[in-house]
């Protein structure tokens, strides 16, 4: 495998990602711990991605579609370097703003305000930078009234608002969006899509996972269809989305 000179923002070369799953069922953590200490836990490998090749150019928005369990979140976690591929190579050029599973990086006992600082620092901002962005984060989230309440009192939609507001407070080279928009209301989704679009026009790269084919079609220039951890097809949304919908009967 040679180092690439393509200048792609995100590049996956024959990437395979494996989860190790304990082979047997354990009925308690204690039982698992004892077996683990005895080195008697057996694992089976589950390949969530297999030989995935993908190149995303700077300024391109690519949709990742597929049924539940297809490997979409695994793909985004791998690009975010939360997971490391067992095989193949991942090249990422630029800063990443990850919006992965809902609530990642949040703490339910802390207030909204405290979570802005916690999540912001996880995204690599200094507390001074977060101070400077705080008012605009709050305004975008629309959560002024609730910001001093603990996060456990928030609805999932409110958590998503806060997460999106923090993660997109500043330009990043690469935005990873994993289904976080689907829990927001229509008006907030619009606002998020506009923000993603404006960053893309400034040159940001977007990897966008969604079950809303309308939104994928609207945002993305290209679509990758994953199934069983493999790329089924990739190409223009108007070609791939109908093929995907025919292939799945719209289920999943
Ligand atoms: N932490 C994990 N441990 C074991 N298996 C996992 C883990 N996360 C995901 N998987 C499995 O990997 C496959 C792909 O999952 P995922 O990437 O979350 O799919 P998608 O986001 O497309 O629904 C699924 O079969 C899922 O059960
Ligand atoms: Mg997922």
Image (cartoon, rainbow, N blue to C red):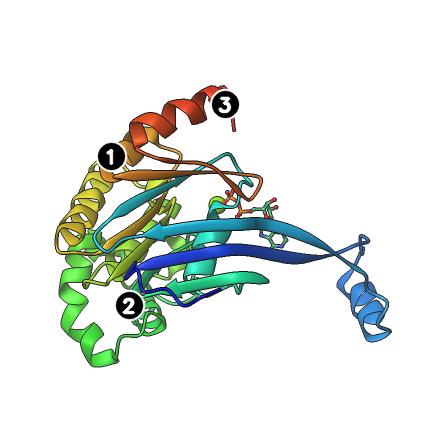
Q: Residues within 10 Å of mark 2 (few under 14, many from 20)?
A: some
Residue sitting nearer the eye, 94 or 233: 233
Q: CA distance from mark 2 to mark 3?
A: 35 Å
> Nearer the N terminus, badge 2 or badge 3?
2
Kindly check if marks 3 and 1 are in contact, taking CB atoms under 8 A apart as contact: no
Whether residue 161 is visible here, answered yes or no, is no
Badge nearest the viewer, 1 or 2: 2
Q: CA distance from mark 1 to mark 2?
A: 29 Å
Viewer-side residue, 136 vs 22: 22
Q: Residues within 10 Å of mark 3 (few under 14, many from 20)?
A: few
Q: Give the image location of residue 43, x and y in percent.
A: 76, 59
Report which quarter residue 166 is drawn in: bottom left
Q: Is mark 3 within 8 Å of ligand 1?
A: no
Residue plotted at (35% across, 38% down): 223
Crowd tier of the residue under label 1, counting other residues whose Cα lies within 10 Å: few below 14, some 14–19, many 20 or above: few
Residue 135: % across, % down: 14, 65
Find numbered disc 3 in the image and state the secondary structure of the residue it sits on: helix
- The answer to whether residue 214 is left or right of residue 200 is right
Residue 216, placed above or below residue 207? above
**The one of 62 and 197 positioned closer to us in this rendering:** 62
Q: Say the numbered circle drawn on residue 95.
A: 2
Residue 128 vertical placement versus 59 (above, below): below
Asked if 29 appears above or below 124 in the picture, the reply is above
The total of numbered circles placed on residues is 3
Residue carrying label 3: 247
Q: Position of residue 204 (x, y in %)?
A: 21, 56
Describe residue 185's horizontal placement relative to residue 53 as left or right.
Answer: left
* Residue 68 appears in view: yes
Going 80% across and 70% down the picture, which residue do you hit? 36
Q: Is mark 2 within 8 Å of ligand 2?
A: no
The residue that label 1 is drawn on is 186
Q: Residue at x 50, y 52 (%)?
A: 74
């Amino acid at each position: 495998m040679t180092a690439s000179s393509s200048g792609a923002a995100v590049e996956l070369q024959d990437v395979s990602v494996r989860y190790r799953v304990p082979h047997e069922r354990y009925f308690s953590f204690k039982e698992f711990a004892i077996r683990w200490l005895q080195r008697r836990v057996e694992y089976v490998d589950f390949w969530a991605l297999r030989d995935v090749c993908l190149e995303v150019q700077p300024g391109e928005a690519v949709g990742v579609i597929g049924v539940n369990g297809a490997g979409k979140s695994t793909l985004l976690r791998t690009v975010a370097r939360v997971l490391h591929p067992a095989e193949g190579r991942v090249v990422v050029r630029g800063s990443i703003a990850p919006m992965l599973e809902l609530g990642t990086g949040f703490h339910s006992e802390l207030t909204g305000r405290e979570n802005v600082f916690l999540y912001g620092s996880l995204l690599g901002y200094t507390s001074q930078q977060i101070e400077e962005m705080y008012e605009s984060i709050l305004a975008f989230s629309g959560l002024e009234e609730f910001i001093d309440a603990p996060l456990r009192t928030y609805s999932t939609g409110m958590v998503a608002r806060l997460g999106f507001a923090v993660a997109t407070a500043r330009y990043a080279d690469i935005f990873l969006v994993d289904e976080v928009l689907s829990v927001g209301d229509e008006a907030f989704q619009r606002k998020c899509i506009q923000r993603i679009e404006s960053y893309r026009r400034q040159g940001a790269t977007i990897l966008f996972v969604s079950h809303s084919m309308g939104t994928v079609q609207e945002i993305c220039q290209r679509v990758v269809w994953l199934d069983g951890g493999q790329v089924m097809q990739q190409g223009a949304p108007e070609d791939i989305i109908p093929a995907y919908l025919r292939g799945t009967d719209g289920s999943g």
